[in-house]
Amino acid sequence: MWMWIRRALVASLLLATATLLAGWAALRGSVPAYDGELALPGLSAPVSVTRDALGVVTIDAANRADMARALGFVHGQERYFEMDLMRRLSAGELAGLLGERALPVDRSNRMHRLRARVAGALPTIVGPEASVLAAYTEGINAGLGALAVRPWPYLLLRRSPTRWQPEDTVLAGYALFFDLQDETNSRELALWRVREALPPALAALVLRDGTAWDAPLFGEARGDAVLPDAASLDLRSLPHPAADAKVTGFAEPAAPGSNNFAAGSAATADGRAIVADDMHLGLRAPSIWFRARLRYADAAAAGGRVDVTGVTLPGIPGVIVGSNTHVAWGFTNSYGDWLDAVRVRFTDAGRSRYRTPDGDAPVVVHEERLEVAHGEPETLVVRETRWGPILPDEAGASEDEALALRWTAHVPGALDFRLLDLARAGDLDQALAVARSAGVPAQNLVVGDASGRIAWRLMGRIPRRVGACDPKSPIDPLAGCDWDGWWPTDAPLQPERVDPPSGRLSSANARIVDGDLLALVGDGGYALGARQKQIADAMNAPGPIDEARLLALQLDDRALFLERWNVLLRRTVAPMSAARWKDIDDVAATWNGRASVDSAAYRLARAFRLEVLARIRDGLLGPARVALGDAYVEPDLPQLEGVAWPLIEQRPAHLLPPRFSDWDALLAEAAEAAADQVRASHEGPLSERTWGEANTARICHPLAGALPGPVGRALCMPADALPGDAQMPRVQGPAFGASQRMVVSPGREAEGVFHLPGGQVGHPLSPFWGAGHADWVEGRPSPFLPGSSTTLLRLAPPAQP
């Protein structure tokens, strides 16, 4: 019996070993080729692909088409799964790969029918880049096909990758619209409903559009709110929810954004320009970006040759942000108004026809099939008007009316590939010519050239609204308000600033413009100005600017904005005698003025501010909650600071949330709630609850959460405590923050700096997995240009028979 038991155990062990070896071999089989020589059909000449110690790729090619083909090969080998997610996100096809859990996203995104829109307009979107896109597409599929085993995520999901098509590159570009804009216009709709439900004086107070922290490039700071007197507004006379209603949290917005700033000849010691850029997005492993240096001959480029270094976006054939020795450029997201709800009035009981200024029109019905991996497909009915899809019934509909969605992403011209022509630009004027005509999700472009010139430009198409339009309400074409194409690039009014006398420019997602320009661009929820002001003040400080100073600004974690909140917290608890209040005061007394990983005071002051804002917001919006009932949706109020601080300073009884006896009671409750919230995260004294404990990195592969403990953790970057926060230049959260950092002077790229969190490659068995991530965490100045080559892959045309 024991002999048979031993044999069974040995057999089981051998089977387990064989299974592990087979799994390991399958996993290893999808590691890309880094060395050697491979045939790549379609090349006109050999191409070299080298990688440095961080996996940064350099491609040397004979021409642009060969570069695109080789870049597609590299992207297809390194990042096919992530590219697949991007195209599926835009098309509403994620469930076909990820299963039923992705259906809610697909239902929302398929409403836009972007795959159908792209297919119908592909020649116009691609334009003169058709041959480059074809080469890139063929390169992607060749790279995918050259892997011994399909990419490892597909093994886990038990799916096979489908081939890349030219329209998929367009869909990858549209994924940025979803990342950077509010694709359902939910914020504008929530604000509209609140505005309709509140008395005008209260609506004007709550929905104020600026603060004393503003630092625009055009115009002045708004300043904080001037509070209405009791005769104009008295919260005590308005209906409010029950006094015991639960306080809903007020969170720092984790909205996509960025910092970029530039110093021109007037601000540097040697008259050159330097550009700094860090784009804030959700963080993952691998990074959304892929670093590359691309060198090739191009008759349309300055000097007949391109040498561009920066980040590519796998799925798109070129550099998105970087420097080409002549110009350097970077982006921050523009929170302009790129969507409108449109009033739709039906003319029949079946809601199959609607009124337009030209007469009745039919509602076009599309039945969209949503595929579900390992499940049954689902049919989604999309009802379309001339302005866009009709929003779901709960979004302001009635029997004879509904709201449709007008989004720039639906309009031909919103996206093209002219952005890639920045790689060819020879000076600032050529770069601005590209920026004025390119179709991208609207961005704040900051650009500098080798002669020391700098500029800011809103890059991307702006809708031309005509008629009597109220930007705060759904537009009504029957009343004369509609879109009429794009704002012309030759119109006198342009969102652009070139060669400022100070030699300094900066943007950080807050309001940039004012007056007529603000009316043109609109307010899509731009950020509180604290971060932008801290950057602008640092840029305007005395002394010449160089790369080291700009990197230090990117890593600035000084909590200037929160300083006064820490003072307020101490004043709030100082009169209290109980031990719990002394505990709070003792922690607040350790304030060091930074969002440093060892600061308990920063964490507590931050929590206190959010608790105070939540109570003030609930008091101001209480009447809207009562009026709207179940239809109430909490609006995003990034400028509430400019209302809350005057309330705290002046403490008017008529604007006190009614459930509190006085302002001291509100502040005391907020202080206690903040301390309780911080304590609840871990056991131990309040003094040990540091910011680093809360702000710990969770930068993982998209599939990490679906795998068991140790295996899932192996797909994550180290759980480092991270300094920085949303209201300062060093934006770093557990899974959100600077998706890259760049500081570079065009023509002097060797002195530049680059950071990339999450690493460059998508395979955990690659020698480059996570490479460079530690430099991002620690802020070490790693080089902008690729280092010495550690691998060499030669791609060559197939041998002729």
Image: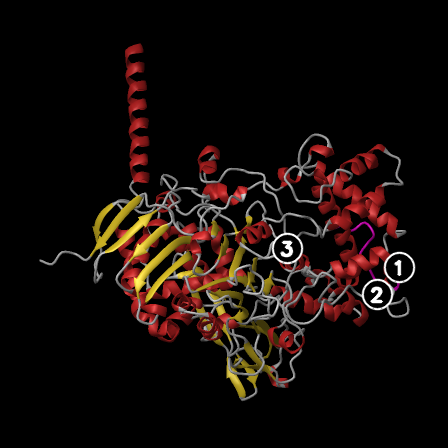
Do tag 1 and tag 3 residues touch (Cβ < 8 Å)?
Answer: no
User: Where does residue 412 sit, x and y in percent of width and height?
Assistant: 45, 75
Amino acid type at image mark 2? Leu
Task: State the extent of the magenta-drawn residues as a range.
Answer: 237-247
Q: Secondary structure at mark 1?
A: loop
Q: Quadrant of residue 357?
A: bottom right
Pick whichever, 534 or 437, lies toward us.
534
Do tag 3 and tag 2 residues touch (Cβ < 8 Å)?
Answer: no
Amino acid type at image mark 3? Pro
What is the crowding at mark 3: few (fewer than 14 residues within 10 Å), some, or many (at least 20)? Answer: few
User: Where does residue 531 sit, x and y in percent of width and height?
Assistant: 65, 56
Q: Secondary structure at mark 2?
A: loop
Q: Secondary structure at mark 3?
A: loop
- The earlier-in-sequence mark between 3 and 2 is 2
Identify residue for label 3: 253
Identify residue for label 2: 227
Residue drawn 37% across the image and 63% down it? 168
